[in-house]
Amino acid sequence: MPYSPYTVPGVSFREEYVKVSDGATLKVVEFIPPEEDKSLPIMVFVAGWISMIKGWAEVLQELTPQFHTLYVETREKISADLPDFKNLEFSIERMAKDVAEVVDKMIPVDRAFAYGGSSLGSTVVLDLMSQDFRQPATGLLVGPVPEFHYPAWGVPIIRYVHPSLYLVVKPVIKWYLKYFRVDRKKEPEQIAKYYGTLDAAEPARLKANALALQNYSLWDKLPNVKSPVVIIGTETDSLHGLDTLEKTVDLLPQGELALMASNKDAHSAKAGQLMVEKLLKLGE
């Protein structure tokens, strides 16, 4: 796949496939700027649930000219090779361990790094940062989700509907997102983005991951996050909720909240510029 739309001329890029300890293999897209400044941290970006790289084009275009960047695709995505699918875990804790193993394999122990992420990816990163793995210089995270709440009718669908019937239930999921979880008038682009990710999802992985998330909670882990974290959110994002983001920041020992005008902005060059600004300050 060509990755030139996600960077600028002169930046090199390549796909890496990293095998983790339970046998799964994850795709990592690596961007390396020309004349890389190795005093700057490597950015490890973990995107959201079943999200696609094209949704982060503007952010990556800001990051990659200056920062060596690893775009990590988590195991629920169709790019992952899962040879023993029925025996694999899809929990947040397992996904956090995946990211830790990618970091250990791809970033030298003497090189600083930072985490970026969005939604489920941000949750994975915060869970990882609360544990005794290598610690980043900072975390720059869009809309983490500390708990996953499904509508009452959603749990039976997730648990009992066979993945082969995904095409039947997908319109119901889209309807729920459009009318109950996203501001369809102010954020039509976000709805289109979610629809695209649902269309590209692999049903069996989606189901396994959704079941694993059902009883997860991040709240008690947040006070254990030692590194500084900037939580990026918007007042209009009903899917992640401003009150949830404020509570997240309050529980983080070094938490900061950065609000953008819209969810579109939080996935745009503006968010990328904010991340670049925060990363450059680390070197001052």
Image (tube, helix red, strand yellow):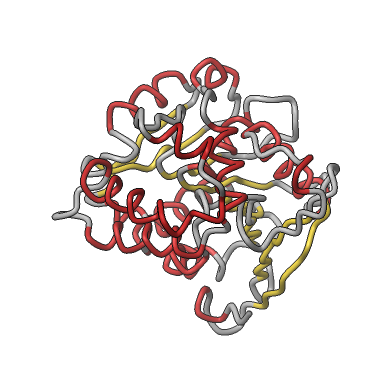
Q: Position of residue 15 (x, y in %)?
A: 72, 70
Image quadrant where residue 188 sits = bottom left
Instruction: Name the residue at 51% across, 73% down.
Output: 6
Q: Position of residue 128 (x, y in %)?
A: 65, 33
Outermost left residue: 185
Instruction: Name the residue at 48% across, 70% down.
Output: 61
Instruction: Name the residue at 50% across, 54% down.
Output: 165
Q: Position of residue 136 (x, y in %)?
A: 65, 39
Q: Is residue 36 above or below residue 95?
A: below
Relative placement, left or right, of 226 versus 183 is right
Instruction: Name the residue at 68% across, 66% down.
Output: 30
| Quarter placement of the N terminus | bottom right
Q: Nearer the viewer, residue 98 or 140?
A: 98
Q: Is residue 265 above or below residue 212?
A: below
All told, the count of numbered labels is 0
Q: Nearer the viewer, residue 259 or 26?
A: 26
Q: Position of residue 60 (x, y in %)?
A: 50, 65
Q: Nearer the viewer, residue 44 or 237?
A: 237
